Image (cartoon, rainbow, N blue to C red):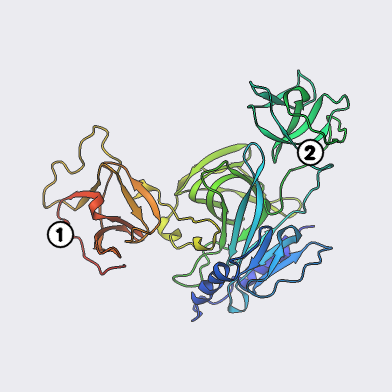
Amino acid sequence: MRRWLAVLVFISLAAAIAAQDNACPALQTEALNNIASRCADQAAGTLCLGHPTVAAIQRPPSSSAAARKPGDTLPVDSLDWLAISTEDRTWGAARAVFPAYAGDSLETREATLVAFGNVALYFPPPVEPPSPLINLTVTASRGAYLRAQPRLDAQIIAPLPVRTQLKAIGTSPNGNWRLVYAAPNQRGWMSQSVVSTSGNTLPVLNADSDIIPLWLPGQIFDFHSGIADAPCDGAWNSGILLQAPNFTTPTYFEINGIRVLLTGSVWLQAQISSGALIHVIDGAARVTAADVTRAVQRGYKVSVPLAIADDRSIQAEAAPTDPVPYDYQRLSRLPVHTLIQPSRVSLALYTLATPAPRDGSSPLSYMSSEDPCKIVAGRDGANLRSRPDPAAPIIAVMAYRDSALPVSRGIGVDSLPWWKLAESVWVRVDATSFAGNCNAIPLIRPGL
């Protein structure tokens, strides 16, 4: 039975800490820096503590020693539930690194989960398949069909191209069909004539065999977190950073019953009253709930209504909302340095910039010296960065003739002038053209 009632009480008590703690945000910084330093050599398949206020409950009969101090680790596959809190005027943080299935061929990718603040996670016990998984490959030059039953007139689940990698778990009683997985939640039958043969013996399974979800430990979890609970200015709200490799086939996750196919990084929060909030800070995601899928690009978020299910878990209740830009300034300081792969908090460009005119004209045409200062990206575009530094992450790119209104200007670390478009949004002057009363734009000291 899930321990959600106890976990919710745990979070509620932890959230009652006074916001005026003099140590804030030093405790948060220390906990997250511990992840970057003391967990630097963290092995795959482990959870590493950034601060002692992490209650990691293992599933019996685990023999792993308890994790008590920063840098201590536990096997991810031993975890039952994890509660991270700010009790005793401290601030919890932990990082899990684990393999996860990705792509149509179910190859594995290394995923990273960083939880901080007031967060509780439940990890369902792993389900063992009835036999070892056998790798098969679609060999038919025109591809093949994954079918719902082991017969040629059965419903087609999906067409699969040649060289698709599959995981086989069984064979039909007549030996002519293989029961395979094409994705963690996509199982069906393939004719033996269209896949590679294997010398391994597969168990005989009938067409009505139970569906076994093919998830690796850490790839599926339920969670609950604080929302707007930063204890002081400069501190972070509670939540989870989840990362899968970018620029590859998407990695599968199931979070509170929500299917997420991810390439890049997301920031997650969840409460019954607010729903699950999924912010795509880098890369892209496809979010599915209630049979509705939303494609979410970096700089955007969706929310999914949540409800308490019969088993007391917190599950998706309805479809995801349409994607909308998130508040970049609120998220710009997320601790992405704790992730394994380099990441960034991206900006939805046209929340600050105006697209280039459709007629090809310059946005600076007909401007007078009395008009408000306007900048326009040059032919090579203009990179927006999180600080006036050419080494800072690129958070968005203005296309040729996109325009924006600067709020201030300053000298960057490269000793060159930069425009500031908003908090943590900078563009170098030499990447732009400008017109209007730009001398009126305030000059601020370097680094601001």
Name the side, left or right, on which 200 lies relative to 39. Answer: right
Q: Nearer the viewer, residue 445 or 107?
A: 107
Q: How many marks?
A: 2
Amino acid type of the residue tagged 1 in the rendering: Asn
Residue 25: x, y in percent? 49, 74
Quick one: SS at disc 2?
loop
What residue does disc 1 label? 439
Q: Earlier in the sequence, mark 2 or mark 1?
A: 2
Residue 351: x, y in percent? 36, 49
Residue 80: x, y in percent? 75, 60
Looking at this view, name the residue that lies furthest to the bottom: 22
Above or below, comparing residue 67 to residue 387 in the picture: below
Amino acid type of the residue tagged 2 in the rendering: Ile
Q: Nearer the viewer, residue 181 or 88?
A: 181
Residue 149: x, y in percent? 78, 26
Above or below, comparing residue 358 to residue 395 in the picture: above
Looking at this view, name the residue that lies furthest to the front: 199
Q: Residues within 10 Å of mark 2 (few under 14, many from 20)?
A: few
> Does any portion of residue 181 appear in the rendered image?
yes
> Does any portion of residue 256 appear in the rendered image?
no
Residue at point 69%, 69% (across, down): 55
Label 2 and label 1: CA atoms lie apart by 68 Å
Q: Quadrant of residue 44?
A: bottom right
Name the side, left or right, on which 217 lies relative to 341. Answer: right
Name the side, left or right, on which 359 lies relative to 159. Answer: left
Quick one: SS at disc 1?
helix
Disc ID at residue 361: none
What residue does disc 2 label? 211
Q: Quadrant of the C terminus?
A: bottom left
Residue at point 75%, 50% (across, down): 310
Residue at point 19%, 50% (across, down): 434
Q: Quadrant of the N terminus?
A: bottom right
